[in-house]
Amino acid sequence: MKKFLAWILALFIASSGLWPAQAIETPYPLLESEAAILMDAATGQILFAKNMHEELSPASITKIMTILLGLEHGQLGDTLTMSREAVFSIEFGSSHIALDTGERITLEQALMATMLASANEAANGIAEYVSGSIDRFVGLMNQRALEAGALNTHFVNPNGLYAEDHLTTAYDMAVITRAALQNQDVRRIFGTVKYEIPPTNKQPQTRYLWAEHKMFPDYRYQYDGMIGGKTGYTQKSQNTLVTVARRDDRELIAVVIKSQNSAVYTDTRALFDYGFDEFVEVPIVLPAVTEAKFPDLPADKIEDIKQMVGQVKAGDTSRLLHKNVSSQDIKVDYTFLPDSAHGRPLVRADIGLTNPSPYMYGDLGAVIIGQESSASQTLWSRTSTLLVLAAKILAGLAGGLIMLLLALKGYFTLRRRLRRKHRRPDRVWVGQRGCEYEQDRH
Protein backbone atom coordinates (compact mmCIF):
# COMPACT_ATOMS: atom_id res chain seq x y z
CA MET A 1 0.00 0.00 0.00
CA LYS A 2 2.86 2.40 0.87
CA LYS A 3 4.50 1.71 -2.48
CA PHE A 4 1.22 2.39 -4.26
CA LEU A 5 0.75 5.74 -2.46
CA ALA A 6 4.35 6.68 -3.21
CA TRP A 7 3.80 5.87 -6.89
CA ILE A 8 0.64 8.04 -6.98
CA LEU A 9 2.50 10.93 -5.31
CA ALA A 10 5.39 10.68 -7.79
CA LEU A 11 2.94 10.67 -10.71
CA PHE A 12 1.22 13.78 -9.34
CA ILE A 13 4.50 15.65 -8.92
CA ALA A 14 5.64 14.73 -12.43
CA SER A 15 2.33 15.72 -14.01
CA SER A 16 2.32 19.07 -12.22
CA GLY A 17 5.15 20.12 -14.51
CA LEU A 18 2.73 20.05 -17.43
CA TRP A 19 1.24 23.32 -16.20
CA PRO A 20 3.89 26.08 -16.19
CA ALA A 21 4.03 28.25 -13.10
CA GLN A 22 3.62 31.39 -15.19
CA ALA A 23 0.57 30.23 -17.11
CA ILE A 24 -1.56 32.61 -15.04
CA GLU A 25 -0.94 36.12 -16.29
CA THR A 26 -1.47 39.27 -14.25
CA PRO A 27 -2.81 42.52 -15.76
CA TYR A 28 0.03 44.55 -14.22
CA PRO A 29 3.75 44.04 -13.44
CA LEU A 30 4.67 41.98 -10.38
CA LEU A 31 7.71 43.67 -8.88
CA GLU A 32 10.21 42.72 -6.22
CA SER A 33 11.12 46.30 -5.32
CA GLU A 34 9.63 47.80 -2.17
CA ALA A 35 8.33 50.88 -4.02
CA ALA A 36 7.96 51.82 -7.67
CA ILE A 37 6.20 54.14 -10.06
CA LEU A 38 5.80 54.51 -13.82
CA MET A 39 4.94 58.04 -14.99
CA ASP A 40 4.24 59.63 -18.35
CA ALA A 41 6.84 62.39 -18.66
CA ALA A 42 4.61 64.56 -20.86
CA THR A 43 1.55 64.80 -18.60
CA GLY A 44 2.62 63.40 -15.25
CA GLN A 45 0.01 60.66 -15.52
CA ILE A 46 0.75 57.68 -13.28
CA LEU A 47 0.46 54.38 -15.13
CA PHE A 48 1.61 52.12 -12.29
CA ALA A 49 2.27 52.61 -8.60
CA LYS A 50 3.49 50.38 -5.79
CA ASN A 51 3.90 52.02 -2.37
CA MET A 52 4.63 55.24 -4.27
CA HIS A 53 4.24 57.47 -1.19
CA GLU A 54 6.27 55.29 1.20
CA GLU A 55 9.19 57.28 2.61
CA LEU A 56 12.44 55.45 1.89
CA SER A 57 16.14 56.18 1.59
CA PRO A 58 16.97 57.20 -2.01
CA ALA A 59 20.76 56.72 -2.01
CA SER A 60 22.45 58.34 -5.03
CA ILE A 61 19.34 59.07 -7.07
CA THR A 62 19.41 62.12 -4.77
CA LYS A 63 22.04 63.46 -7.13
CA ILE A 64 19.40 64.17 -9.79
CA MET A 65 18.32 67.14 -7.68
CA THR A 66 21.95 68.20 -7.13
CA ILE A 67 22.63 68.13 -10.87
CA LEU A 68 19.43 70.06 -11.65
CA LEU A 69 20.30 72.82 -9.19
CA GLY A 70 23.85 72.99 -10.46
CA LEU A 71 22.55 73.64 -13.96
CA GLU A 72 19.82 76.06 -12.86
CA HIS A 73 22.20 78.19 -10.77
CA GLY A 74 25.52 77.87 -12.56
CA GLN A 75 27.42 78.02 -15.83
CA LEU A 76 28.97 74.87 -17.26
CA GLY A 77 32.31 76.54 -17.87
CA ASP A 78 32.68 77.95 -14.36
CA THR A 79 35.53 76.64 -12.22
CA LEU A 80 34.98 74.86 -8.89
CA THR A 81 37.73 74.65 -6.30
CA MET A 82 37.32 71.63 -4.05
CA SER A 83 37.37 72.41 -0.34
CA ARG A 84 38.64 70.11 2.39
CA GLU A 85 35.08 69.82 3.69
CA ALA A 86 33.79 68.71 0.28
CA VAL A 87 36.54 66.12 -0.12
CA PHE A 88 36.78 64.64 3.37
CA SER A 89 33.18 64.74 4.60
CA ILE A 90 32.19 61.69 2.56
CA GLU A 91 32.04 58.23 4.10
CA PHE A 92 35.09 56.00 4.00
CA GLY A 93 34.87 53.68 0.98
CA SER A 94 32.00 55.55 -0.71
CA SER A 95 32.08 56.45 -4.40
CA HIS A 96 34.47 59.19 -5.49
CA ILE A 97 36.94 60.05 -8.25
CA ALA A 98 39.78 61.03 -5.91
CA LEU A 99 39.35 64.78 -6.14
CA ASP A 100 41.76 66.57 -3.82
CA THR A 101 41.61 69.67 -1.65
CA GLY A 102 42.30 72.72 -3.80
CA GLU A 103 41.70 70.85 -7.05
CA ARG A 104 40.01 72.92 -9.76
CA ILE A 105 37.51 71.43 -12.19
CA THR A 106 34.69 72.89 -14.25
CA LEU A 107 31.05 72.68 -13.29
CA GLU A 108 30.40 70.39 -16.26
CA GLN A 109 33.14 68.03 -15.11
CA ALA A 110 31.69 67.97 -11.60
CA LEU A 111 28.22 67.28 -12.97
CA MET A 112 29.47 64.44 -15.15
CA ALA A 113 31.43 62.93 -12.25
CA THR A 114 28.31 63.15 -10.08
CA MET A 115 26.11 61.48 -12.69
CA LEU A 116 28.37 58.86 -14.27
CA ALA A 117 30.71 57.89 -11.43
CA SER A 118 28.34 58.92 -8.61
CA ALA A 119 31.22 60.85 -7.10
CA ASN A 120 30.12 62.03 -3.67
CA GLU A 121 32.83 64.66 -3.26
CA ALA A 122 31.91 66.12 -6.67
CA ALA A 123 28.30 66.49 -5.49
CA ASN A 124 29.59 68.31 -2.42
CA GLY A 125 31.65 70.58 -4.64
CA ILE A 126 28.55 71.46 -6.68
CA ALA A 127 26.69 72.25 -3.47
CA GLU A 128 29.39 74.62 -2.26
CA TYR A 129 29.64 76.24 -5.69
CA VAL A 130 25.90 76.96 -5.82
CA SER A 131 25.16 77.92 -2.21
CA GLY A 132 28.48 78.56 -0.51
CA SER A 133 28.01 75.66 1.89
CA ILE A 134 26.54 72.16 1.85
CA ASP A 135 23.98 73.01 4.55
CA ARG A 136 22.60 76.01 2.64
CA PHE A 137 22.44 73.92 -0.51
CA VAL A 138 20.35 71.29 1.28
CA GLY A 139 17.78 73.96 2.07
CA LEU A 140 17.68 74.85 -1.63
CA MET A 141 17.22 71.17 -2.51
CA ASN A 142 14.15 70.87 -0.31
CA GLN A 143 12.69 74.11 -1.61
CA ARG A 144 13.14 72.98 -5.22
CA ALA A 145 11.59 69.60 -4.41
CA LEU A 146 8.43 71.38 -3.22
CA GLU A 147 8.37 73.47 -6.40
CA ALA A 148 8.62 70.29 -8.49
CA GLY A 149 5.58 68.85 -6.71
CA ALA A 150 7.24 66.56 -4.18
CA LEU A 151 5.06 65.76 -1.19
CA ASN A 152 7.18 63.73 1.23
CA THR A 153 10.83 64.49 0.55
CA HIS A 154 13.45 65.60 3.07
CA PHE A 155 17.04 65.83 1.85
CA VAL A 156 19.92 66.30 4.31
CA ASN A 157 22.88 66.01 1.93
CA PRO A 158 23.58 66.52 -1.79
CA ASN A 159 24.94 63.03 -2.54
CA GLY A 160 22.51 60.52 -1.01
CA LEU A 161 24.85 58.95 1.53
CA TYR A 162 22.69 57.26 4.11
CA ALA A 163 21.17 59.36 6.88
CA GLU A 164 18.17 58.35 8.94
CA ASP A 165 16.17 61.46 8.02
CA HIS A 166 17.27 61.62 4.36
CA LEU A 167 14.05 60.36 2.78
CA THR A 168 11.96 60.56 -0.35
CA THR A 169 9.33 58.52 -2.20
CA ALA A 170 9.03 56.91 -5.60
CA TYR A 171 6.39 59.49 -6.52
CA ASP A 172 8.54 62.42 -5.44
CA MET A 173 11.57 61.18 -7.37
CA ALA A 174 9.39 60.83 -10.46
CA VAL A 175 8.12 64.43 -10.28
CA ILE A 176 11.65 65.69 -9.51
CA THR A 177 12.97 63.81 -12.54
CA ARG A 178 10.11 65.14 -14.66
CA ALA A 179 11.07 68.68 -13.65
CA ALA A 180 14.74 67.97 -14.38
CA LEU A 181 13.91 66.72 -17.88
CA GLN A 182 12.73 70.21 -18.80
CA ASN A 183 16.40 71.19 -18.80
CA GLN A 184 18.18 70.12 -21.99
CA ASP A 185 21.56 69.94 -20.28
CA VAL A 186 20.10 67.48 -17.78
CA ARG A 187 18.99 65.33 -20.70
CA ARG A 188 22.47 65.47 -22.22
CA ILE A 189 24.12 64.47 -18.95
CA PHE A 190 21.51 61.74 -18.36
CA GLY A 191 22.37 60.22 -21.71
CA THR A 192 26.17 60.38 -21.47
CA VAL A 193 27.84 56.97 -21.35
CA LYS A 194 31.53 57.97 -21.37
CA TYR A 195 33.30 61.15 -20.30
CA GLU A 196 36.90 62.24 -19.80
CA ILE A 197 38.24 64.75 -17.31
CA PRO A 198 41.66 65.94 -18.52
CA PRO A 199 44.58 66.49 -16.13
CA THR A 200 44.05 69.19 -13.50
CA ASN A 201 46.24 71.22 -11.17
CA LYS A 202 46.23 68.25 -8.76
CA GLN A 203 45.85 65.22 -11.01
CA PRO A 204 48.37 64.63 -13.83
CA GLN A 205 46.36 61.83 -15.44
CA THR A 206 43.10 61.85 -17.36
CA ARG A 207 40.10 60.49 -15.49
CA TYR A 208 37.88 58.19 -17.56
CA LEU A 209 34.28 57.97 -16.43
CA TRP A 210 31.74 55.36 -17.53
CA ALA A 211 28.00 55.33 -16.85
CA GLU A 212 27.03 52.85 -14.14
CA HIS A 213 23.45 52.46 -15.36
CA LYS A 214 23.23 49.03 -17.01
CA MET A 215 20.34 49.70 -19.40
CA PHE A 216 22.36 51.67 -21.94
CA PRO A 217 23.11 49.99 -25.30
CA ASP A 218 25.73 47.23 -25.08
CA TYR A 219 25.30 46.97 -21.31
CA ARG A 220 24.03 43.87 -19.53
CA TYR A 221 20.40 45.00 -19.20
CA GLN A 222 20.23 47.20 -22.30
CA TYR A 223 16.78 48.51 -23.17
CA ASP A 224 15.54 49.83 -26.50
CA GLY A 225 14.69 53.52 -26.16
CA MET A 226 16.83 54.10 -23.08
CA ILE A 227 17.52 57.82 -22.62
CA GLY A 228 19.37 57.80 -19.33
CA GLY A 229 19.03 57.69 -15.59
CA LYS A 230 20.77 57.45 -12.23
CA THR A 231 21.76 54.51 -10.08
CA GLY A 232 21.90 54.41 -6.31
CA TYR A 233 23.06 52.02 -3.61
CA THR A 234 23.96 51.93 0.04
CA GLN A 235 23.86 48.92 2.31
CA LYS A 236 20.86 50.27 4.20
CA SER A 237 19.07 51.84 1.24
CA GLN A 238 19.73 48.86 -1.03
CA ASN A 239 19.46 49.46 -4.80
CA THR A 240 17.54 52.41 -6.21
CA LEU A 241 17.15 53.42 -9.83
CA VAL A 242 15.64 56.22 -11.90
CA THR A 243 15.37 55.57 -15.64
CA VAL A 244 13.90 57.47 -18.58
CA ALA A 245 13.03 55.77 -21.87
CA ARG A 246 11.32 56.91 -25.05
CA ARG A 247 9.62 55.12 -27.92
CA ASP A 248 7.98 57.05 -30.70
CA ASP A 249 6.27 60.02 -29.02
CA ARG A 250 5.94 58.39 -25.61
CA GLU A 251 8.47 59.17 -22.89
CA LEU A 252 8.22 57.35 -19.56
CA ILE A 253 9.89 57.72 -16.17
CA ALA A 254 10.43 54.62 -14.04
CA VAL A 255 11.53 54.77 -10.41
CA VAL A 256 12.26 51.74 -8.23
CA ILE A 257 13.44 51.98 -4.63
CA LYS A 258 14.79 49.40 -2.21
CA SER A 259 15.53 46.59 -4.66
CA GLN A 260 17.63 43.49 -4.24
CA ASN A 261 20.44 42.81 -6.72
CA SER A 262 19.27 42.49 -10.35
CA ALA A 263 15.62 43.25 -9.47
CA VAL A 264 16.43 46.92 -9.82
CA TYR A 265 16.80 46.33 -13.57
CA THR A 266 14.29 43.54 -14.16
CA ASP A 267 11.60 45.56 -12.38
CA THR A 268 12.43 48.62 -14.46
CA ARG A 269 12.25 46.59 -17.66
CA ALA A 270 8.87 45.16 -16.62
CA LEU A 271 7.54 48.67 -15.98
CA PHE A 272 8.69 49.97 -19.36
CA ASP A 273 7.32 46.94 -21.24
CA TYR A 274 3.99 47.50 -19.51
CA GLY A 275 3.92 51.23 -20.33
CA PHE A 276 5.02 50.96 -23.95
CA ASP A 277 3.16 47.80 -24.96
CA GLU A 278 -0.12 47.93 -23.05
CA PHE A 279 -1.24 51.57 -23.36
CA VAL A 280 -2.67 53.74 -26.12
CA GLU A 281 -3.08 57.51 -26.16
CA VAL A 282 -6.67 58.81 -26.31
CA PRO A 283 -8.02 62.38 -26.44
CA ILE A 284 -10.05 63.56 -23.46
CA VAL A 285 -13.36 65.23 -24.28
CA LEU A 286 -14.41 67.48 -21.40
CA PRO A 287 -18.16 67.25 -20.70
CA ALA A 288 -20.31 70.39 -20.69
CA VAL A 289 -20.65 72.31 -17.43
CA THR A 290 -24.12 72.40 -15.85
CA GLU A 291 -25.52 74.55 -13.06
CA ALA A 292 -25.98 71.42 -10.96
CA LYS A 293 -22.18 71.07 -10.76
CA PHE A 294 -21.86 74.45 -8.97
CA PRO A 295 -25.08 75.06 -6.99
CA ASP A 296 -23.47 77.74 -4.79
CA LEU A 297 -22.05 79.92 -7.58
CA PRO A 298 -23.86 82.88 -9.16
CA ALA A 299 -25.05 82.54 -12.73
CA ASP A 300 -22.40 84.88 -14.19
CA LYS A 301 -19.58 82.79 -12.69
CA ILE A 302 -21.08 79.60 -14.04
CA GLU A 303 -21.32 81.21 -17.46
CA ASP A 304 -17.62 82.12 -17.31
CA ILE A 305 -16.78 78.54 -16.41
CA LYS A 306 -18.86 77.20 -19.30
CA GLN A 307 -17.00 79.43 -21.73
CA MET A 308 -13.59 78.41 -20.41
CA VAL A 309 -14.37 74.71 -20.58
CA GLY A 310 -15.89 75.13 -24.02
CA GLN A 311 -12.65 76.64 -25.33
CA VAL A 312 -10.68 73.49 -24.50
CA LYS A 313 -10.60 71.36 -27.63
CA ALA A 314 -10.66 67.57 -27.60
CA GLY A 315 -7.08 67.35 -28.81
CA ASP A 316 -5.75 69.72 -26.15
CA THR A 317 -5.80 67.06 -23.46
CA SER A 318 -4.99 63.39 -23.79
CA ARG A 319 -4.23 60.46 -21.52
CA LEU A 320 -2.80 56.97 -21.81
CA LEU A 321 -5.33 54.17 -21.40
CA HIS A 322 -4.67 50.47 -21.01
CA LYS A 323 -5.80 48.47 -24.03
CA ASN A 324 -8.42 46.74 -21.89
CA VAL A 325 -9.92 50.03 -20.70
CA SER A 326 -12.39 51.97 -22.85
CA SER A 327 -12.52 55.75 -23.19
CA GLN A 328 -16.15 55.40 -22.12
CA ASP A 329 -14.82 54.42 -18.68
CA ILE A 330 -13.39 57.92 -18.16
CA LYS A 331 -15.12 60.42 -15.92
CA VAL A 332 -14.39 64.12 -15.36
CA ASP A 333 -15.29 66.00 -12.16
CA TYR A 334 -15.15 69.81 -12.01
CA THR A 335 -14.08 71.87 -9.01
CA PHE A 336 -14.23 75.66 -8.79
CA LEU A 337 -10.97 77.30 -7.69
CA PRO A 338 -10.96 80.97 -6.65
CA ASP A 339 -8.01 82.82 -8.17
CA SER A 340 -7.25 85.78 -5.92
CA ALA A 341 -4.14 86.70 -7.91
CA HIS A 342 -6.03 87.45 -11.13
CA GLY A 343 -9.56 87.96 -9.89
CA ARG A 344 -10.78 85.35 -12.36
CA PRO A 345 -12.18 81.91 -11.65
CA LEU A 346 -10.27 78.75 -12.35
CA VAL A 347 -11.66 75.29 -12.86
CA ARG A 348 -9.94 72.03 -12.03
CA ALA A 349 -11.03 69.08 -14.13
CA ASP A 350 -10.16 65.84 -12.32
CA ILE A 351 -9.88 62.96 -14.78
CA GLY A 352 -10.31 59.41 -13.60
CA LEU A 353 -11.99 56.07 -14.19
CA THR A 354 -15.62 55.50 -13.31
CA ASN A 355 -14.69 52.22 -11.62
CA PRO A 356 -11.39 50.79 -10.34
CA SER A 357 -9.56 48.81 -12.99
CA PRO A 358 -7.20 45.87 -12.46
CA TYR A 359 -5.25 47.00 -15.53
CA MET A 360 -4.09 50.53 -14.66
CA TYR A 361 -3.88 53.24 -12.03
CA GLY A 362 -7.26 54.93 -11.82
CA ASP A 363 -6.37 58.57 -11.19
CA LEU A 364 -5.50 60.16 -14.55
CA GLY A 365 -4.56 63.54 -13.12
CA ALA A 366 -6.13 66.98 -13.36
CA VAL A 367 -6.28 69.89 -15.77
CA ILE A 368 -6.48 73.50 -14.60
CA ILE A 369 -8.61 75.59 -16.95
CA GLY A 370 -8.56 79.39 -17.14
CA GLN A 371 -4.89 80.28 -16.62
CA GLU A 372 -3.33 83.00 -18.74
CA SER A 373 -0.22 81.05 -19.65
CA SER A 374 -2.08 78.21 -21.31
CA ALA A 375 -5.53 76.80 -21.82
CA SER A 376 -4.75 73.96 -19.46
CA GLN A 377 -2.11 72.77 -17.05
CA THR A 378 -1.57 69.22 -15.90
CA LEU A 379 -1.54 68.66 -12.14
CA TRP A 380 -1.31 65.49 -10.14
CA SER A 381 -2.50 63.73 -6.97
CA ARG A 382 -5.50 66.07 -6.86
CA THR A 383 -3.32 68.73 -5.27
CA SER A 384 -4.61 72.20 -6.08
CA THR A 385 -2.40 75.15 -6.93
CA LEU A 386 -3.51 76.75 -3.68
CA LEU A 387 -2.08 73.85 -1.69
CA VAL A 388 1.24 74.10 -3.49
CA LEU A 389 1.31 77.88 -2.89
CA ALA A 390 0.57 77.36 0.80
CA ALA A 391 3.41 74.85 1.04
CA LYS A 392 5.83 77.35 -0.50
CA ILE A 393 4.73 80.11 1.91
CA LEU A 394 5.17 77.82 4.89
CA ALA A 395 8.56 76.74 3.60
CA GLY A 396 9.61 80.35 3.31
CA LEU A 397 8.46 81.23 6.83
CA ALA A 398 10.32 78.24 8.22
CA GLY A 399 13.43 78.99 6.20
CA GLY A 400 15.03 81.26 8.79
CA LEU A 401 14.62 78.74 11.59
CA ILE A 402 15.91 75.90 9.41
CA MET A 403 18.98 77.87 8.38
CA LEU A 404 19.76 78.62 12.03
CA LEU A 405 19.46 74.96 12.99
CA LEU A 406 21.57 73.88 10.02
CA ALA A 407 24.24 76.41 10.90
CA LEU A 408 24.42 75.12 14.47
CA LYS A 409 24.54 71.53 13.21
CA GLY A 410 27.35 72.40 10.79
CA TYR A 411 29.31 74.17 13.53
CA PHE A 412 29.24 71.24 15.92
CA THR A 413 29.88 68.74 13.12
CA LEU A 414 32.94 70.68 12.02
CA ARG A 415 34.23 70.78 15.59
CA ARG A 416 33.95 66.99 15.84
CA ARG A 417 35.71 66.46 12.52
CA LEU A 418 38.58 68.79 13.43
CA ARG A 419 39.19 66.74 16.55
CA ARG A 420 39.51 63.55 14.53
CA LYS A 421 42.66 62.48 12.79
CA HIS A 422 41.96 62.99 9.11
CA ARG A 423 42.44 59.86 7.08
CA ARG A 424 42.19 59.84 3.30
CA PRO A 425 39.82 57.16 1.94
CA ASP A 426 41.31 54.56 -0.32
CA ARG A 427 40.96 55.76 -3.86
CA VAL A 428 38.51 53.28 -5.23
CA TRP A 429 37.93 53.86 -8.92
CA VAL A 430 34.22 53.87 -9.66
CA GLY A 431 32.17 54.10 -12.81
CA GLN A 432 34.37 51.79 -14.86
CA ARG A 433 32.45 49.84 -17.40
CA GLY A 434 31.82 46.29 -16.30
CA CYS A 435 31.22 46.99 -12.60
CA GLU A 436 28.01 45.38 -11.41
CA TYR A 437 25.29 46.94 -9.29
CA GLU A 438 26.29 44.88 -6.24
CA GLN A 439 29.70 46.55 -6.31
CA ASP A 440 28.54 50.13 -6.73
CA ARG A 441 28.96 52.13 -3.54
CA HIS A 442 26.92 55.27 -3.61
Image (cartoon, helix red, strand yellow):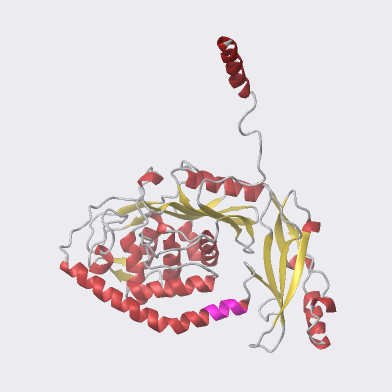
In the picture, the quarter occupied by the C terminus is bottom left
Q: Residue at x 34, y 81 (%)?
A: 404
Spot occupied by residue 266 in the image (x, y as percentages of width and height): 52, 43
Quarter placement of the N terminus = top right
Position of residue 337 relative to residue 50, above or below, is below
Q: Quadrant of residue 175?
A: bottom right
Whether residue 21 sits left or right of residue 396 in the image: it is right
Tell me where the magenta segment starts and ends, as one range: 386-391
Residue closer to the observer: 91 or 80: 91
> Is residue 116 something that shows in the picture?
yes
Q: Main secondary structure of the magenta part?
A: helix
**Number of callouts in the render?**
0
**Percent position of residue 116, x then y:** 40, 55
Residue 188 vs residue 419: left or right?
right
Identify the residue shown where x is 55% and y is 80%. 390
**Front in this rendered view, residue 70 or 91:** 91
Residue 362 as seen in the image, left or right of residue 156: right
Q: Which residue is at a point 36% across and 52% down the rendered structure image?
A: 209
Q: Residue furthest front?
A: 1
- Position of residue 175 relative to residue 9, above or below, is below
Find residue 363 and report its horizontal and vertical position in percent: 67, 62
* In-image side of 311 versus 30 (left or right): right
Can the viewer see residue 83? no
- Tell me where residue 358 appears, x and y as whole percent: 69, 50
Verify whether residue 208 appears in magenta: no
* Quarter of the view holding residue 19: top right
